Image (cartoon, rainbow, N blue to C red):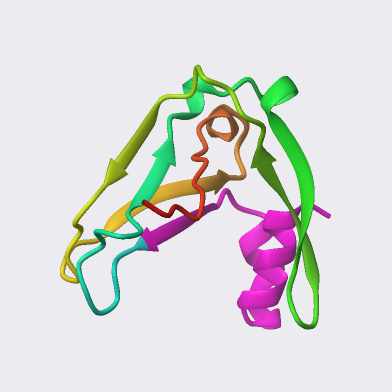
Amino acid sequence: MSCAVERIHRHIPATEVDALLRKRFQIINLWRPINVSAFDCPLALCEYTSVNPKEDLVPVTLVHPDWGEETYRLKYNPNYKWKYWKGMEPNEVLVFKVYASYLYFRMIKTAYPGNIN
């Protein structure tokens, strides 16, 4: 079972899961600073077209207190193209797709680190 499907099972009521998985779906992230402007730790996103999935992505297990999930980390590559939003305000929101179940959009993903300025 893919990590995205596992997330559906974890966060959607069990009575809705089967119907949802018969359709196309996406997982979207919403990011914003909670209390103060993001100057010290701005959000950074890596342009996916600058990532070579076969060479740059390393599968890792993200361990939660009661479960684990497969995700990926990026190897260093000087060719990555990065965007960052220094100084985002709590009233600003960035929306980006991290998964799409349908084949055409599986290529369009976003890599993002925990970033410290």
Bounds of the magenta span? 1-30
Q: Residue at x 61, y 29 (%)?
A: 76
Q: Residue at x 25, y 48 (%)?
A: 85
Instruction: Choose top left, top right, bottom left or bottom right for residue 92.
Output: bottom left
How many labels sit on residues? 0
Left or right, residue 85 beside residue 74: left
Left or right, residue 116 beside residue 6: left
Q: Is residue 4 magenta?
A: yes
The relative height of residue 59 versus residue 47 in the rendered view (above or below) is: below
Q: Residue at x 73, y 56 (%)?
A: 3
Between 4 and 14, which is closer to the camera in this rendering? Answer: 4
Q: Quadrant of the N terminus?
A: bottom right
- Percent of width and height locating residue 13: 63, 82
The relative height of residue 97 versus residue 57 in the rendered view (above or below) is: below
Instruction: Choose top left, top right, bottom left or bottom right for residue 68.
Output: bottom right
Left or right, residue 27 beside residue 1: left
Between 114 and 112, which is closer to the camera in this rendering? Answer: 114
Q: Residue at x 67, y 66 (%)?
A: 7
Looking at this rendering, what residue extends furthest in the right direction? Answer: 1
- Percent of width and height locating residue 32: 30, 65
Q: Is residue 97 magenta?
A: no
- Percent of width and height locating residue 48: 50, 29
- Percent of width and height locating residue 24: 57, 48
